Amino acid sequence: MANQHNASAVSASVDASSKPTWTGGWEVSTDGRYEVRPVARQSTEGFIAGYESSWRGGEGPVVYAGPPHASLPEAQKAAESHIYERLREHDTPLQHYPEVGKTYRGTVISITDADLVMAVEGQHIRHERRELSGPQGLLSPGAKVEIRYPANRVGILREWGAMEMRTGTSKGREPKGFG
């Protein structure tokens, strides 16, 4: 792992060759290209918060920033805030997970073997592909899909938008009759 020590941002001495004391999980930008995870390292003055970043799964630099913290939990919180700042720099909104009982209609913006992210009313919703039931051929960036979670964690997938565009009405909203 390539390590980088940012001396101007750290007010405590940190050995750039030693491994982090704590490493959190990777967070991925919605386009799937940028990854970042929180890290913390113990120094002689306390715990220093930082982050490791990479592009498309490659090894990236570890950067430490800010003053030392008295405890590891304090440094972990500071490190978590560092990663959200990095994601925000890449114009990556926070991703939300689907809730049981809800239906999500939107556009697929990224897809991997493990999950897909769709834009729904200004939010990005991350769905686990192994929990989706339906025609997997619909899953491509730019596709308009509906994913329902009726009663459990399994999402029911279907195409969305085609019928609504042809008829001008959406399913479940039939025009009122005469009388």
Image: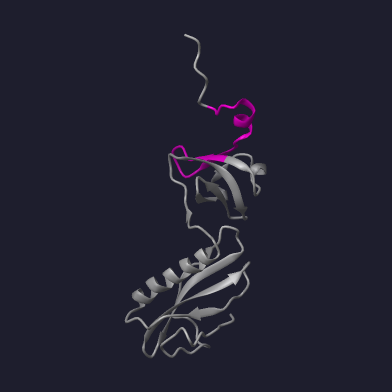
Taking 153 as reference, is 94 above or below it? Answer: below
* Residue 77 horizontal/vertical position (percent): 38, 71
Whether 142 is among the magenta residues is no
Query: Which quarter shows the N terminus?
Result: bottom right
Q: Nearer the viewer, residue 115 or 68?
A: 68
Residue 179 or 80: which is nearer the viewer?
179
Residue that appears at 50% across and 64% down? 88
The colouring scheme, among rainbow, by chain, secondary structure or one colour, is: one colour
Q: Is residue 161 magenta?
A: yes
**Looking at the image, residue 2 lies above or below residue 165:** below
Q: Which residues are magenta?
A: 146-171
**10 with respect to 140 (left or right):** left
Residue 103: percent from left, percent from top: 48, 39
User: Where 12 sits versus 56, above or below?
Assistant: below
Q: Residue at x 59, y 81 (%)?
A: 2
Q: Residue at x 63, y 67 (%)?
A: 56
Q: Identify the image quadrant of residue 53.
A: bottom right
Q: Quadrant of residue 34?
A: bottom right
- Residue 157 at what x, y percent from top left? 57, 39
Q: Position of residue 25 (x, y in %)?
A: 48, 67
Numbered marks: total: 0
User: Which residue of the protein is positioned furthest toward the left in this rendering?
Assistant: 70
Q: Residue at x 47, y 51 (%)?
A: 97
